[in-house]
Image (cartoon, rainbow, N blue to C red):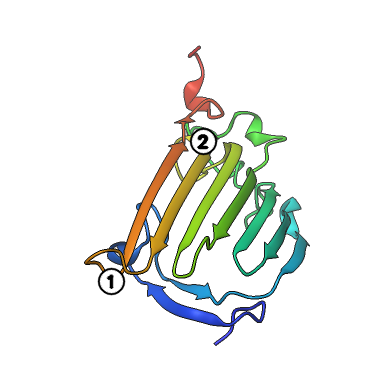
C-alpha cells in the first residue's frame, strides 16, 4: 500500500475512538499510516478556493524527506461572510426585531469567521530501530459567529505540541516508546455583538 505521495507504508492502523487516539484531544475516525524510509526528496503543494458568501480557502505545505530526517510544514487561511437563507437574509438578520439575540446593526460588516492555522512536524531516525518526532500546530481566530447560540466567540485560539521517541528492544522490553504533549485552547464567548448586551459596559 502507498501513501498519496507514492511512498510505501510500513504500517497502517485506524483511530476509531478515544481509546485508540494517540493522545488526548486527537481526532477519531481516521486512518494513520507510517511510511517506509525513502531517498532524499522535497515537495511543495498549495491550494486555493473561493466560494459563495465570500468564502476564501487558502493553504500550502512544504515537505522534505531523507533516509533519517523528515520535515513537513504548512499553513492555511479560511474566511467567509455570513451565509444567506432562502429568502435572501444573512443569518445575522434572521432574528425577530423583539429578540434580544439579534445582532446589533443586523451584523453589518461582520465576517462569519476568519481562521489562520500553521503547523510543522519534524521526524528523525538517529539509529536503526529508533524514531523520534516533534510536531506543533497553532490556530488563531477572531470574532467567530455562532448564530444558533446566544453568544459569539471573541477568539478561538489553540496550540498543540507533541513529542515522541520510540526504540526497538530495550532490556526486557521488546519495544519502548515515550511521549509528551501539551494542549492549550482559548475560546472566550460573550454577547457583545447582540442586543442583549445593550446597557452593559
What is the CA distance from the residue labelled 2 to the residue labelled 1? 48 Å
Q: Is residue 9 left or right of residue 168?
A: right
x then y, percent, for residue 38: 64, 75
How many numbered discs, if any?
2
Quadrant in the rendering for residue 176: bottom left
Q: Is residue 176 above or below residue 140?
A: below
x then y, percent, for residue 23: 36, 55
Going 52% across and 60% down the picture, which residue do you hit? 126
In this figure, which residue is indicated by the disc labeled 1?
Answer: 174
Q: Is residue 134 above or below residue 99?
A: below
Q: Is residue 24 above or below residue 11?
A: above
Disc 2 is placed on an element classified as: strand
Going 60% across and 39% down the picture, which residue do you hit? 141
Which circle, 2 or 1, is nearer the viewer? Answer: 1
x then y, percent, for residue 31: 46, 74
Quadrant where the N terminus sits is: bottom right
Q: Is residue 106 above or below residue 176?
A: above
Depth check: give the residue in front, 96 or 190: 190
Depth check: give the residue in front, 121 or 18: 121
Graded by Cα atoms within 10 Å as few (under 14), some (14 to 19) or many (20 or more), the crowding at tag 1 reads: few
Mark identifier at residue 1: none
Depth check: give the residue in front, 64 or 13: 64
Going 39% across and 65% down the picture, which residue do you hit? 28
Graded by Cα atoms within 10 Å as few (under 14), some (14 to 19) or many (20 or more), the crowding at tag 2 reads: many
Q: Is residue 119 left or right of residue 184?
A: right
In this figure, which residue is indicated by the disc labeled 2?
Answer: 153
Amino acid at each position: 500500500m502507498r501513501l498519496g505521495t507514492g511512498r510505501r507504508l510500513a504500517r497502517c492502523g485506524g483511530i476509531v475512538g478515544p481509546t485508540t487516539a494517540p493522545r488526548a484531544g486527537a481526532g477519531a475516525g481516521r486512518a494513520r499510516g507510517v511510511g517506509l524510509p525513502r531517498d532524499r526528496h522535497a515537495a511543495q503543494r498549495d491550494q486555493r478556493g473561493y466560494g459563495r458568501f465570500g468564502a476564501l480557502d487558502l493553504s500550502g505545505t512544504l515537505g522534505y524527506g531523507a533516509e533519517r530526517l523528515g520535515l513537513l510544514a504548512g499553513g492555511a487561511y479560511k474566511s467567509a461572510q455570513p451565509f444567506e437563507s432562502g429568502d435572501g437574509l444573512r443569518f445575522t438578520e434572521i432574528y425577530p426585531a423583539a429578540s434580544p439575540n439579534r445582532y446589533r446593526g443586523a451584523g453589518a460588516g461582520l465576517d462569519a469567521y476568519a481562521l489562520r492555522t500553521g503547523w510543522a512536524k519534524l521526524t528523525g531516525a538517529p539509529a536503526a530501530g529508533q524514531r523520534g518526532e516533534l510536531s506543533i500546530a497553532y490556530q488563531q481566530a477572531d470574532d467567530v459567529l455562532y448564530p444558533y447560540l446566544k453568544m459569539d466567540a471573541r477568539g478561538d485560539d489553540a496550540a498543540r505540541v507533541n513529542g515522541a521517541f520510540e526504540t526497538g528492544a530495550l532490556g526486557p522490553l521488546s519495544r519502548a516508546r515515550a511521549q509528551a504533549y501539551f494542549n492549550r485552547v482559548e475560546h472566550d464567548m460573550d454577547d457583545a455583538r447582540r442586543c442583549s448586551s445593550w446597557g452593559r459596559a
